Image (cartoon, rainbow, N blue to C red):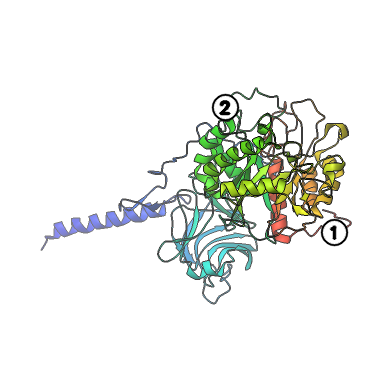
Amino acid sequence: MCTVLTCTILVCLILIIVFSVNKNNDEESPTTKLVSSTDGGGLRPPDSSVENTNDNSKVPMVSNIPLSSPTTFAPTISPTISPTTSAMPSSFPTGLADRPLNCVQSVVDSDTLLIPHSRDYYRGDVHCLRLGQEYAYFGFTWMGQFGLFVNDTSVWTISSAAIMEDAHRYVFQNDGNLILDDMDGNPLWKSRSENSFDGQLRVSFERVWIETTMGFSPWSEPTPPPLVNDYPDPNGALQYFAYYYPWYRRGDWSRHGYQDEPLLGKYGTDEVAVAEQHIEWALQTGISTWVVSWWGNSSLSMRHFSAGMMQAPSLSKIKFCILYETTILDDRGSWYNGTKEESLFEDLKVIRDEFFDHPSYLKINDRPVLIFYITRSRMSFLEGFDGVSVLANMRERLGTDIYFIADEPFFNTYFETPEENGNAFVNGTQVFDAYTTYNMFRNSVVVEGETATEYQLREGMPIWQSWAEQLPLFPNVMPQYYDFRGHEPLLGSSEDFMLQLREVACLPRTNFSGAPHIMFITSFNEWWEGTQIEPEDGSLDNWNNYGFQFMETLAAFKKEVDATGTPWCGEEEDDR
């Protein structure tokens, strides 16, 4: 029992404590995000013990580089956010059900909201956005849908019934990954944006994206990640393979001249941070596979690729295959006495042992893919020399059913059509599994001042058409060209590149025998021939100030094709 004075003091202390707690709650900043402490000590500010483990010290931040298409790359809108935990206001939808959704976060009179890190959300929890008479919500509806909805119409949802049947919770993790998991915490779907420790998950009326200090998003739309095994479906989506060159030394690019300056500066391809940056750009752009230039077991390319790209954690998100540079067979024997074939076998054995078992190595119908550069001059199976037998012998000796693609079609009568080409057919049997063109450039036929698309469609299209009508052909697109040899340049622009993408995508697909639909991009980073789509730094001293334009154009084209197919094919006019 307490005295009157003692009880009075206790009551006053209790009132002070209660008042202090309420005051702190009332004064919480609308943008403050609190997350559960890992040590059981209550709540803490989200950045108090989260450390960015990415080593990006060698890669400059590019957040100040203006982007010409903010609808493709991350915008810079930073709205004021007022988190709430209340029933959805009457002006918001009910999630197509008779049970109101729980509007865990509401933003009014804004076109964007920011979702906090490390908070668990469940069925019925949505993030609500209202601007005038328009409303949007993102999250998990009572009807078992997960996605973005505007005025009760879905902008994007996860379409897999199997995923949504088991879905229980969604959370935007501290590592920058949006995840949907089941009752036991097993992930059912991820946004492929992990390791973006500074990433911010944003929602607008058009899309959902993750914005980083790099000034772009590694995940610009929440689509399920591609399958990580094969591309067996010949009727599947168009895939984009980009040629990748791991031959650059940091600070010393003096081996050849080049015209534009990379946004990342004179980087080194043996650096993991550079590889991570390139992978993020590839995923953002829609590139599914690197086609990696390989010059031998002891080459700079081999050493750099092994030290950089092969060590990148994000390599699990993208495929790669080898472009065998056939010029390394020069002066290494003859096809006719078997010595050159033996040299080829030794090289392919190295490639098999180093790469084929890697989980990210590209396979078509469970067959590892290998591309031969300019077979027409370095692997010309002519005058009784049976190329079918050579490739069959390679597969048998290696114990691996390699899917061989040949860079064969080119100019002059012998290469322009497959009928008389010894690398196309031998006694009616197709020699390679598929065919492609790395680069259709020939200086003598360039018209001064023309664009890359004007050149490609005039000179390359008839040859592609001839081959595509008879054999599986994976054509290439090339946004620009300006090499170190002094040849005529081919300028490019976003509009020009879009036209080329559309025209090339409409080539016939004949005799594909289970092969996917592939378009090759020449190139991601071949700076010495000036064909790259990798961003340049926007300097006025550059030859072509394209910035992010080519990446943006490819991303926009992919989005259009994924949504509608190729509706312009076969039309006489296209007013787009």
Residue 68 vs residue 459: left or right? left
Q: Left or right: 397 with respect to 125?
A: right
Q: Which mark is residue 277?
A: none
| Local crowd size for mark 2, using a 10 Å CA cut-off: few (<14), some (14–19), many (≥20) | some
Residue 62 horizontal/vertical position (percent): 59, 36
Name which residue type carries label 2.
Answer: Arg
Pick whichever, 269 or 213, lies toward us.
Answer: 269
Q: In this view, does 142 lie above or below 254?
A: below
Q: Residue 480 versus residue 341: which sits nearer the camera?
A: 341
Q: What SS does tag 1 mark?
A: loop
Observer able to see residue 41: yes
- The quadrant of the rendering that contains the N terminus is bottom left
Q: Do the residues labelled 1 and 2 touch (CB within 8 Å)?
A: no
Residue lying at 68% horizontally and 42% vertically, measured from the top left: 372
**Residue 72 visible to an observer of this rendering:** no
According to the image, label 2 marks what residue?
250
Mark 1–mark 2 distance (CA, rounded to whole Å) = 47 Å
Q: What element carries label 2?
A: loop
Front-lying residue, 511 or 59: 511
Check disc 1 and give the amino acid type: Gly
Residue at (71% x, 40% y) in the render: 522
Q: Nearer the viewer, residue 274 or 293?
A: 293
Q: Where is residue 299 in the image (x, y as percent from the top left)?
A: 58, 30
Q: Horizontal and vertical percent for residue 328?
A: 65, 32
Residue 176 to residue 1: above or below: above
Query: What is the quadrant of residue 183 in the picture?
Result: bottom left
> In the visual, does 250 lie left or right of 242?
left
Q: Quadrant of residue 96?
A: bottom right
Query: Residue furthest toward the bottom?
Result: 98
Bin the neighbour count of mark 1 within 10 Å (Cα to Cα): few under 14, some 14-19, many 20 and up. Answer: few
Q: Residue 570 carries which label?
A: 1
